[in-house]
Image (spheres, rainbow, N blue to C red):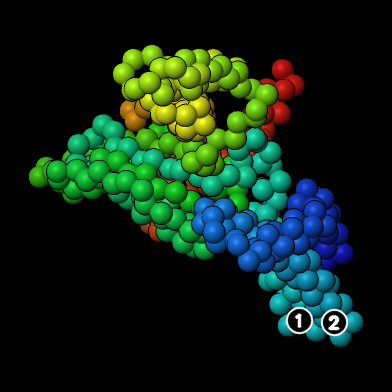
Amino acid sequence: MATDFPTELSALQATFAQISAVSDPEALKAKIADLESQAAAPDLWDDQDNAQAVTSALSNANGELERLETFRRRIEDLKVLVELGTEGEDAETLAEAETELEVLKKDLSSMEVRTLMSGEWDERNAVVTIRSGAGGDDATDFAEMLLRMYLRWAERHGYATKVLDTSYAEGAGIKSATFEVNAPYAFGTLSVEAGTHRLARISPFGSADKRQTSFAAVEVIPQIESTDHVEVAEADLKIDVFRSSGPGGQSVNTTDSAVRITHLPSGIVVSMQDEKSQIQNRAAAMRVLQSRLLLLKKEEEAAQKKELAGDIKASWGDQMRSYFLYGQQLVKDLRTGYEVGNPQVVFDGDLDGLIDAGIRWRKQQQVENQAS
């Protein structure tokens, strides 16, 4: 049956219009202009952390805009190709148009998935931790296979990664590993990979060639930005001065040089009297207060990350995906039912189908939960 190009093109354009509305190219252009202005500042690299954040955000925004514009051009080029093939009754050109149509539909479907990510943290970079579970050497080997799988997936997409920590097993593989993925929507994308992964295969570590089942847990959390300095509003401070006590000489004991600072929102109190002047004591107290507020902030972030990551076990009855490397070669997601008949391509980083299905499944779950 001949392809109904007018209907297919209309559907493509409608899908792209929805994606474009969510992505908002004009807002992206405004964001790029602002970031370019910041990047052009002569003192940009005086603060290296800020400079890296600005240049990374600029690169990501430019990449996002370029993807949108590339899709727009590809759809327009396909329309021209269809017109040429139809007017000239050129079967070869129409076959080329049909091939490009299928590729465009697949690529646009993947891009559409991003519009389904609207969580508070979805735009953030991701921090992924893989831990081996039950299964001995097979489990630690499986954990290393998953680490390679995700790093290869990121490499396929040109996403920057950084392995932060690796704990090697005494035998094969790894006990655990933690790595960052620095890309727009990395957390929203990879968060559907969180859970228990199960591997079933003939163990390469046993002498009896028996089937072995092993487990590994994948945890995905957003990268929460923090700085070495916490802004403190003057209105949030209660500052008391009083006479110092204890050793230190007459200048310490006879003047109101001691300082007590109370941070009203948190209730943190810092007193300082070791310096000889009120100005010095106040500066020292503010440094201590800053340190305590930063520590408090990190503790709150850690608690929030733990809540987002959830309680993930690596054992029976908790798995979200199974990898079968014996008999019927198969990777099956137990939530979505999505299957891949070639596990090796999955372990080589071809995860997009599994991830996209997971994101669509998650969105459907959210919709159903809101409706109930």
Toward which corner of the image does residue 209 lie, by quadrant? Answer: top left
Q: Which residue is mark 1?
A: 93
Q: State the residue in front, 223 or 88.
A: 223
**SS state under label 1:** helix
Q: Which residue is mark 2?
A: 84
Residue 295's label in the rendered image is: none
Location of residue 340 with respect to 101 vertically, above or below: above
Determine whether 90 is above or below 298 in the image: below
Label 2: element kind = helix
What residue is drawn where x is 52% and y is 53%?
Answer: 49
Check the image and report above or below for 26 versus 98: above
Query: What percent of the width, then of the height, locates residue 342?
Result: 42, 55
Crowd rating for badge 2 (residues with CA inside 10 Å; few <14, some 14–19, many 20+): some
Q: Is residue 119 visible?
A: yes
Separation (CA) of disc 1 from disc 2: 7 Å
Question: Do callouts 1 and 2 mark residues in contact (Cβ within 8 Å)?
Answer: yes
Foreground of the two, 18 or 164: 164
In this view, the residue farthest toward the right is 87
Q: Amino acid at mark 2?
A: Leu
Name the residue nearer the viewer: 117 or 49: 49
Q: Is residue 350 left or right of residue 92?
A: left
Instruction: Work out which quarter of the rendered image holds the C terminus and state it.
Output: top right
Q: Which quadrant of the figure contains the N terminus? A: bottom right
Q: Earlier in the sequence, mark 1 or mark 2?
A: 2
Percent coordinates x, y for residue 66 in the rendering: 70, 66
Please name the residue shown 77% across and 77% down the image: 94
Crowd class of label 1 (few under 14; some 14 to 19; many from 20; radius 10 Å): some
Q: Residue 208 vs residue 291: left or right?
A: left
Name which residue lies at 54% across and 59% down.
46
Task: Give the x, y percent position of residue 256.
Answer: 50, 18
What amino acid does circle 1 point to?
Thr
